[in-house]
Image: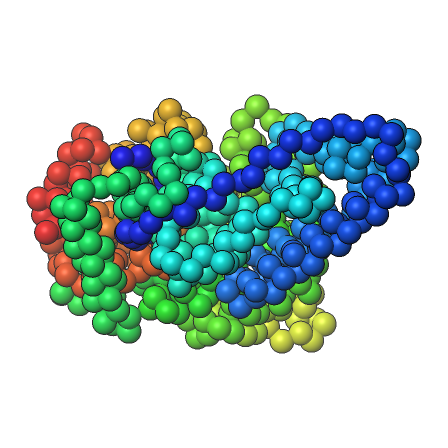
Amino acid sequence: MLKGIAASSGITIAKAYKLETPEIIIEKKEGCDPAAEYARFEAALEQSKQDIQHIKEAATGRLSDEELAIFDAHLMVAEDPAMASEVKMMCENEKVNCDYALDKVAGNYIAMFESLDDEYMRERAADIRDVTTRIKYHILGVKIADLSLIDEESIVVAHDLTPSDTAQLNKKYTKGFATEVGGRTSHSAIMARSLEIPAIVGIEHVMSEVKHGDTLILDAIKGELLINPDEATIAEYQKKAEAYREEVEALKVLKDAKSCTTDGHKVLLVANIGTPNDVEGVIANGAEGVGLYRTEFLYMNAQALPTEEEQYQAYKKVLEAMNPKPVVVRTLDIGGDKKLPYLPIDPEMNPFLGYRAIRLCLDRKDIFRTQLRALIRASAYGKLEIMFPMIATLGEFREAKKVFEEEKAKLVAEGVKIGEDIEVGMMVEIPAAAVLADQFAKEADFFSIGTNDLIQYSMAADRMSEKVSYLYQPFNPSILKLIKMTIDGAHKEGKWCGMCGEMAGEPDAISVLMGLGLDEFSMSATSVLRARKVANSVCYEEMKKLADKALQCCTAEEVLDLIHATVK
Ligand code: PEP
Ligand code: MG
């Protein structure tokens, strides 16, 4: 059994389809005819462009616009005149074969992008490798694996899946995939979730351990891959897979149900989204709104800062689709691990503690104002709530709110129609803000607790580091106390308090958070129905007692034991 990171939930059993990337050996040949070599290169280039175009067309409808944009990026690489002319020059000056010339030219570009200390730029290196490898295959007449040709139920096993590979996957036959590289937020993981294919990524040695045609059990709930299991294990997992499907199916009856405890206490179960396309899943899973729209993806998937109009269209699409349900949009949270290629930030020792989110927006008010204008204009189409990320001081909140008020006043003066009451709140993800929540609540319309960051800052444990991941402890009583301070602070001023960190969707956490008085829980859309089942089965008065006891505990383990003993 091999272990990896469960990137897209589900259990599936099928034969392995190994995606072997053909090894090609490029040899340098001298004394070649430059014109003939360049013609060969151009023919392969043309064929590659057509391939990319076809893959894009085949994936249209299956993938979101943002995901399809990857192929535009690939076409841009293929159409880059600089690369073609460098290949041409090398063929002419050195009289070498075109595959060798391309290999050298592409290699330089890839090395350059890979050397940059920036995840986004490194992904561009992957794009260049993807496209130029295709061109080389065509030059050498190597057959390119076409995953769209898979015609029996399979689990695709690969070192990595490029965006063009993932886009070719046919859901009818591809029952899951397992890759050697990748994390929860890698391209392939994101695609797997949007295609709703179970997937495990980051499985070490999966390519050497699995043979083509092996029977595999992919448990993408636990992140385990079983190779050639015996009949009894297969039978056991068939039952588990069936139980999982039944559970998912059974939960559907709760789609239009209220999120209400047995003694009539209502909460709001809403979803986190990254792109307008995610709204479909939000509605399909019965979420009562959007509790966190991470707008940075709009910026990360672009080649330059998105214009006011581009942003307006995206926000309007979400608000219209959700109307009259609320949509909480978070203003740009860039920096930390999220970077923009066209907006270089000076290297910092501790980017998570550095120039990011609201800190950057208050420094670059031009960027901030454009986003706020787009949002305020879109507010006419639904129930918009805006929140600022990474607020540490009241001064920051006041300054951000002032910019919002200025832009709103300008738009009103311009006669632009806007929504009636746009709430302006903030994320509570810095311990200082949680401790001072009672003061913030006098000025903010609502809070949304970002536990992903709140926990990393409270425990001083980098959320990206495997080594200290044991300190990610949502149930540590210290974290529960900070959450309580935040909720109490809001309620004292008659404001509401939500949570949009991963903790809000953890079934074990819901009961205790409810007891602490949390009003809104925002999670991945596929977690909503399971959360509703918990909410509908507990008694609020009991959960209040549970929360009181949890606050008296000394360790996270004690809190979890208490929850398991109380909530069945
Ligand atoms: C959080 O910090 O909990 C949060 C929701 O924001 P992000 O994960 O985008 O930092
Ligand atoms: Mg955060």
Residue 472 in the image: state x and y as whole percent: 33, 33
Front residue of 522/265: it is 522
Q: Is residue 478 above or below residue 134?
A: above
The answer to whether residue 534 shows anywhere in this view is no
Q: Is residue 165 left or right of residue 270?
A: right
Q: Nearer the viewer, residue 417 or 453?
A: 453
Residue 320 at what x, y percent from top left?
Answer: 51, 74
| Left or right: 170 as drawn, with respect to 343 | left
Q: Kindly identify the residue that appears in the image at 37 percent across and 38 percent down.
A: 211
Q: Is residue 381 above or below residue 251?
A: below
Left or right side of 490 for 261: left
Q: Which residue is painted at 20% across and 54% down in the image?
A: 238
- The residue located at (47%, 44%) in the rendering is 19
> Which of the 4 image quadrants contains residue 551?
top left
Question: x%, y% of residue 282?
Answer: 40, 65
Q: Is residue 521 left or right of residue 229?
A: right
Of the 4 image quadrants, the one containing the N terminus is top left
Instruction: Check the image and tell me how it is coloured.
Output: rainbow
Q: What residue appears at the point 69 percent right and 42 percent down from the top-left corner?
A: 140
Total labels drawn: 0
Q: Nearer the viewer, residue 36 or 191?
A: 36
Q: Is residue 19 above or below residue 249?
A: above
Q: Position of residue 408 (x, y in %)?
A: 63, 64
